Amino acid sequence: MSLSATATRFFSTSKDELTSKKRDEFEDILEERRLSSDLRYAMKCYTPVIYKGLSPCKPNAIKSVVLQSEQVQYVIKQLAKEMGESPDIIQEEAMEILDEMGHSMQLGTVRFFAFTLSKIFKQLFQRVCVNEEGMQRLQRAIQEHPVVLLPSHRSYVDFLMLSYLLYTYDLALPVIAAGIDFLGMKIVGELLRRAGAFFMRRSFGGNRLYWAVFAEYVKTMLRNGYAPIEFFLEGTRSRTAKTLTPKFGLLSIVMEPFFKREVFDTYLVPISISYERILEESLYAYELLGVPKPKESTSGLLKARRILSDNFGTIHIYVGQPVSLRTLASGRINLCPYNLVPRHLPQKPTEDIQEFVSDVAYKMELLQIENMVLSPWVLVAAVLLQNLPAIDFELLIEKTVWLKGLTQTFGGFIEWPDNLCAKKAVMSGLTLHSNIARLVDGHVVLNDKGIEDGAVGEIVFKRALVILMCSTYRNQLLNVFVRPSLVALALQMTRSFRKEEVYSSFSFLRDIFSDEFIFFPGISLKDFEEGCFLLTKCDAIQTTQQEIYPTDKGSVVVSFLSAMFRPFVEGYQLIFRYLSKETKEAFTEKQFVPGVRNFVFQLLEKGATQCYEALSSDMQKNALAALVQLGFDVQIEQSCLFLMKELLFCVL
């Protein structure tokens, strides 16, 4: 049971910080918007705080700087030599890439969005709450060093939310990395470009020119401090409300100017955006069940106007403490290799640098998770999913209050509506999410109106939709509960109180679910100790030097935590069962997902399982990724039989 000293230092969190962190107060920025003119707000005098070393540069001038840079010119000459082409032809291609990619931010368009988004947000949301202290910290950071904004990603709303926020607080507007798909939206794509979006292809493949131009474009904006750079570490929207494993490409690009000593420091700012109700909740459930995602289009956006008559509750935006890249790298990274090579030459990062980039990515995501705000409905959804098909309303309130206390003990960030008693808070959640659950004759049930009509397959599909929508909100709680819950599951697996055996089972579960939840690499023991500490704090277990055992009152907590994660355990069992029986030859992910979905669907139709969440393509892909990462992808049949047997003890 060893733990890397470097990893421990890099991600140090005291036990007190786990449960007693002081967080900033929130301010509702829509309150003023409801009381004053949106047009006056959009046309206000906008004098943003900017980077102290900034030399103003127009978007087209930035493209010229990038095109003439030593880095891009070097790659152009190399490709011309290799391909036997004229450098002018390659340079023309580079210019086309820049024209496709580059932003063309204009204040007039920003004002248009300020006016339009004010109207839309007031229609959609009751409140948009921001921690003002976080905005003040961000203001100071923008003045001192280049800044990278790293928001969580749960909805399309995230895309322009920070621009709206920074405009409101008179801060420099960000340039935002966006998928090339948005350019397919007539008019809207160009408006986004003029609001600060720059566009990147989903895959660069082996296109060295595209990579060189894109990387240099981002680094030019960063090292000159033209604007804060905003991108999503997760790469795409999470369809399940669980944080996705980070993508490293853009992060490594924005860190390179520091590695090459082109900037003194870079600030990374984790930002947590929490939705009381997610706009795309229904769309996500359909996608997880295999219905293709609608292509981004202007007509699709116009059709979505009908949601303006709906209520989506409150958004909480928590701007985290800016993190100094220089501080993170201190004593960890040897920058000498960068000093030995001319800056314009492409250089493959060392293993140390790659590991450092990975560690920073996970650290930023864990900081996002730490400041996610949980609404009472999240607690209600967690209780409801453990008590299907129905739960007495008064019992639901009682269990929700109990879970609220446990969540706070574990350090969860709950925002309970002001002056609302538990009954009214639960009722408020049910009203907001009436498409998911409803009160019938004193009992709360999933909203399954019309589900019993139709063929068996249709009934299964409709029920799966509602359960996946409900699980999206329960999933927000799992970030807080994952470590103590895996300890609880490990206790059930081992049927032993020996700490070493419990830790071994914990490590196994942590590895299996490494794509479901965010774990900092290399600190399995620390995660285990954190889980034990939190269970001890709520009197669920007692520990000695050699043993861990549940207390008499702890059985309720351990049972609840185990049940909360049961869908993942049972879902993985079903997926491994499919792999062990149905797959005899090599297969691709595209073949695997429909195959396992049909397998689980048939079991649900027969009543052989009630694990509807195993239909989720997200869970299916994560289980497959875990097999590959653990090296079980060679002897699939034997490996899956072994994993099924191990997981079986979690649900007995």
Image (cartoon, grey):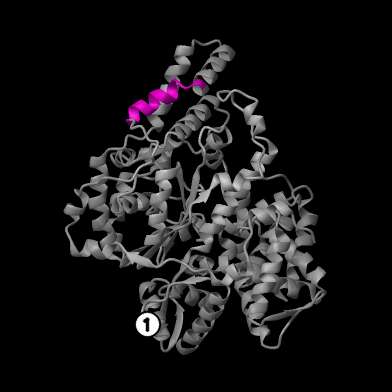
Indicate the position of residue 86 as horizontal and vertical percent values: 49, 10
Front in this rendered view, residue 306 or 220: 220
Horizontal arrangement in the rendering, residue 647 relative to residue 159 (left or right): right
Secondary structure under badge 1? Answer: loop
Identify the image quadrant of the C terminus.
bottom right
Horizontal arrangement in the rendering, residue 177 relative to residue 206 (left or right): left
- In the rendered image, residue 60 lying in the magenta stretch gets the answer yes
Measured along the vertical axis of the image, is residue 483 above or below residue 293? below
Measured along the vertical axis of the image, is residue 519 above or below residue 401? above
- In the rendered image, residue 89 lying in the magenta stretch gets the answer no
Horizontal arrangement in the rendering, residue 167 relative to residue 339 (left or right): left
Identify the image quadrant of the N terminus.
bottom right
- Residue that carries the numbered disc 1 in the rendered image: 420
Indicate the position of residue 550 as horizontal and vertical percent values: 72, 82
Front in this rendered view, residue 484 or 183: 484
Q: Is any part of residue 228 visible from this angle?
A: yes
Indicate the position of residue 455 as horizontal and vertical percent values: 49, 68
Horizontal arrangement in the rendering, residue 510 relative to residue 436 (left or right): right
Number of marks in the image?
A: 1
Residue type at mark 1 is: Leu
Indicate the position of residue 163 as horizontal and vertical percent values: 34, 49
Measured along the vertical axis of the image, is residue 268 above or below residue 194? below
Front in this rendered view, residue 337 or 207: 337
**Dominant secondary-structure state across the stretch colored magenta:** helix
Residue sitting at x 31%, y 37%: 105
Image quadrant in which you'd find residue 51: top left
Residue sitting at x 79%, y 65%: 504
Q: Is any part of residue 244 visible from this angle?
A: no
The span picked out in magenta is 58-70
Residues packed near mark 1 inside 10 Å, few (<14), some (14 to 19) or many (20 plus): few
